């Protein structure tokens, strides 16, 4: 089956967590909105009233299924492509971790858009600065410390053991994104999360991920995505 991924074609954004899973799995997929007329096709699916219309991208068409919400898509792909444990308890645990990543991603977004997504960053610079201070003082240590503790406690290469899961791919993306958005702050912080950094390195070396990162399928970070680099926010 050829999957159809629907996500904005110019950014990594939330679609990247799905792209990483599809790429690691070596799945056959088309990144629809990166093709001619793809964004129109994406909007059409969102506007449909019947079936299971998604609220927002990313969403995935898998045969007759149309699946929205990043964590939900990964729940589906993880089970089909060996990127999740086999037990119900293991899958729920992984899904729980991915939902926590979803929460964190929103907080990353809110560093540059603390007053909401409808205003430009340039119209919320002062609150963004304040929010970013809190984000780095309180929230990054809390979230990444949580994941660091989990990896430390199980003492294995990946978050649930010896095999990589979609959560490991997402943790890779968080470290990469923070490095891009806040290079100075992240450089100082990385000493506190050595196991997450090692996990990031392990993911980067996985053959399919390595090939993907070197390809033009990997869209470069930019200032339209979730992780943005604004020098004034980087300490
Ligand atoms: N909780 C959803 C959030 C989806 C979301 O916010 N998508 C963004 C792009 S990253 C979007 O296009 N939102 C449109 C909107 O909120 O109106 C997920 O994790 O997939």
Image: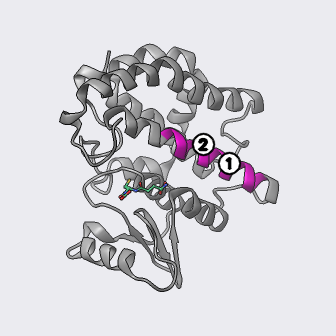
The reply to whether residue 87 is in sight is no
Please give the name of the residue rendered at 66% of the width and 53% of the height, measured from the top-left corner: 95
Image-based side of 61 in relation to 194, left or right: left
Classify residue 111 by image quadrant. Answer: top left
Give the residue number, with chain letter if any, for mark 1: 96
**How far across and how far down the image is residue 228, in percent?**
29, 36
The reply to whether residue 144 is in sight is yes
Q: Are marks 1 and 2 in contact (CB under 8 Å)?
A: yes
Q: Residues within 10 Å of mark 1 (few under 14, many from 20)?
A: some
Asked whether residue 95 is drawn in magenta, I would say: yes
Task: Examine the rendered structure and indicate whether residue 187 appears above or below residue 76.
Answer: above
The CA span between labels 1 and 2 is 6 Å
Judging depth in this view, the residue of 105 and 210 nearest the camera is 105
Q: Secondary structure at mark 2?
A: helix
Please give the name of the residue rendered at 76% of the width and 28% of the height, measured from the top-left corner: 153
Asked whether residue 145 is drawn in magenta, I would say: no
Image quadrant of ligand 1 equals: bottom left
Please give the name of the residue rendered at 25% of the width and 75% of the height, measured from the top-left corner: 40
Judging depth in this view, the residue of 5 and 130 nearest the camera is 130
Give the residue number, with chain letter if any, for mark 2: 100
Image-based side of 50 in relation to 111, left or right: right
Q: Which residues are magenta?
A: 90-104
Per the picture, the main secondary structure of the magenta-coloured stretch is helix
Residue projecting furthest to the front: 115
**How far across and how far down the image is residue 4, in percent?**
42, 74
Image-based side of 154 in relation to 126, left or right: right
Judging depth in this view, the residue of 115 and 48 nearest the camera is 115
**How far across and how far down the image is residue 125, in percent?**
24, 28
Please give the name of the residue rendered at 29% of the width and 68% of the height, measured from the top-left corner: 33
Judging depth in this view, the residue of 107 and 197 nearest the camera is 107
Task: Examine the rendered structure and indicate whether residue 126 appears above or below residue 77.
Answer: above
């Amino acid at each position: 089956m050829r999957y159809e991924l629907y996500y904005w074609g110019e950014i990594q954004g939330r679609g990247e967590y799905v792209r990483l899973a599809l790429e690691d799995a070596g799945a056959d997929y088309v990144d629809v909105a990166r093709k001619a007329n793809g964004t129109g096709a994406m909007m059409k699916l969102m506007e449909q009233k019947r079936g299971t219309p998604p609220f927002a991208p990313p969403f995935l068409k898998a045969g007759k299924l149309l699946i929205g919400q990043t964590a939900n898509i990964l729940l589906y792909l993880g089970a089909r492509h060996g990127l999740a444990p086999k037990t119900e308890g293991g899958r729920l645990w992984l899904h729980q971790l991915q939902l926590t990543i979803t929460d964190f991603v929103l907080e990353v977004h809110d560093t540059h858009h603390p007053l909401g997504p409808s205003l430009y960053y340039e119209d919320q610079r002062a609150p963004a600065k304040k929010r970013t201070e809190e984000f780095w003082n309180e929230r990054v240590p809390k979230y990444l410390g949580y994941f660091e503790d989990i990896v430390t406690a199980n003492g294995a290469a990946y978050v649930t053991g010896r095999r990589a899961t979609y959560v490991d791919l997402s943790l890779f993306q968080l470290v990469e994104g923070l490095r891009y958005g806040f290079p100075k702050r992240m450089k100082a912080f990385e000493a506190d999360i050595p196991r997450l950094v090692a996990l990031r390195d392990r993911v980067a070396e996985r053959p399919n991920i390595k090939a993907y990162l070197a390809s033009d399928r990997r869209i470069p970070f930019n200032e339209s995505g979730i992780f943005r680099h604004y020098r004034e926010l980087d300490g």
